[in-house]
Amino acid sequence: GAGVSQSPSNKVTEKGKDVELRCDPISGHTALYWYRQSLGQGLEFLIYFQGNSAPDKSGLPSDRFSAERTGGSVSTLTIQRTQQEDSAVYLCASSPGQGDYGYTFGSGTRLTVV
Amino acid sequence: AQSVTQLDSQVPVFEEAPVELRCNYSSSVSVYLFWYVQYPNQGLQLLLKYLSGSTLVKGINGFEAEFNKSQTSFHLRKPSVHISDTTEYFCAVSKRGNNDMRFGAGTRLTVKP
């Protein structure tokens, strides 16, 4: 596609439920990244993919968070048993390769846990 | 891991005045440096980047930044700001050959008439 697409744009969920956030990167971009932006905060690195592999998962806040990427394209970020502190904007970005080009970001998914 | 510090959380400035948004980075290896802008309810947009070569980098919307290795800084500047420049700006650093870009906490630029 022309840009990075994220869905849903907004998600309200009840505490304890599972949620899936989707990211569709720019076609041909091999690298994909997930960040979390809490209110008034900078961007917290969560995970990145090179192809379908995730060399660095150390940014995931807890074992309730997981992510996968299939076919070198779409990625899903899953949060299990959501907590109120998970409320944030989840941003996805993609880049052509090894992080030296600057990223193209999606508009984000605003997650609210009530 | 590499990190960045944006020294000012908020910068107020009058329209048509010059502005500098400060960014310092920390890394034991060579880095790439970036400035991004975020408009409300949107993702981040790349303003400019330093990869190598000239230390003065020019970006979109009249912004420029200068890489200073000795001071480990990458400050963003604009000689004359507009009301439309009011928004959040993020500095970011990535180790060369590495894929995890780290962002600062952001600087809110407010341009007043």
Image: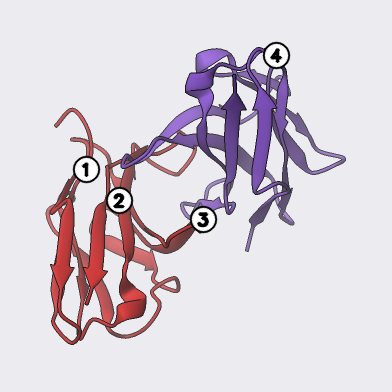
Chain colours: A red, B purple
How far is mark 1 from mark 2, CA to CA?
Answer: 8 Å
Mark 1, residue position: A25
How far is mark 3 from mark 1, CA to CA?
Answer: 22 Å
In this rendering, the label closer to the viewer, 3 or 1 = 3
Residue lying farthest front? Answer: B113
| Residue B68 occupies quadrant | top right
Mark 4, Cα crowd under 10 Å, few <14 / some 14-19 / many 20+, is few
Chain where mark 2 sits:
A
Mark 4, residue position: B79
Mark 3, residue position: A42
Q: Is residue A29 left or right of residue A17?
A: right
Mark 2, residue position: A92
Chain where mark 4 sits:
B
Do the residues at discs 4 and 1 belong to one chain? no
CB atoms at circles 1 and 2 under 8 Å apart? yes
Q: How many marks?
A: 4
Measured along the vertical axis of the image, is residue B51 above or below residue B95? above
Using the rendered image of the protein, determine whether residue A44 is visible from the camera's viewpoint. yes
Do the residues at discs 2 and 3 belong to one chain? yes
Q: Under tag 2, what secondary structure? A: strand
Q: Is residue A54 left or right of residue B47?
A: left
Query: What residue do we see at 13% from left, 82% from top?
Result: A17
Disc 3 marks which amino acid? Gly
Using the rendered image of the protein, determine whether residue A21 is visible from the camera's viewpoint. no
In this rendering, the label closer to the viewer, 1 or 2 = 2
Do the residues at discs 3 and 1 belong to one chain? yes
Do the residues at discs 4 and 2 belong to one chain? no
Query: What residue do we see at 46% from left, 52% from top?
Result: B99
Measured along the vertical axis of the image, is residue A20 above or below residue B113? below
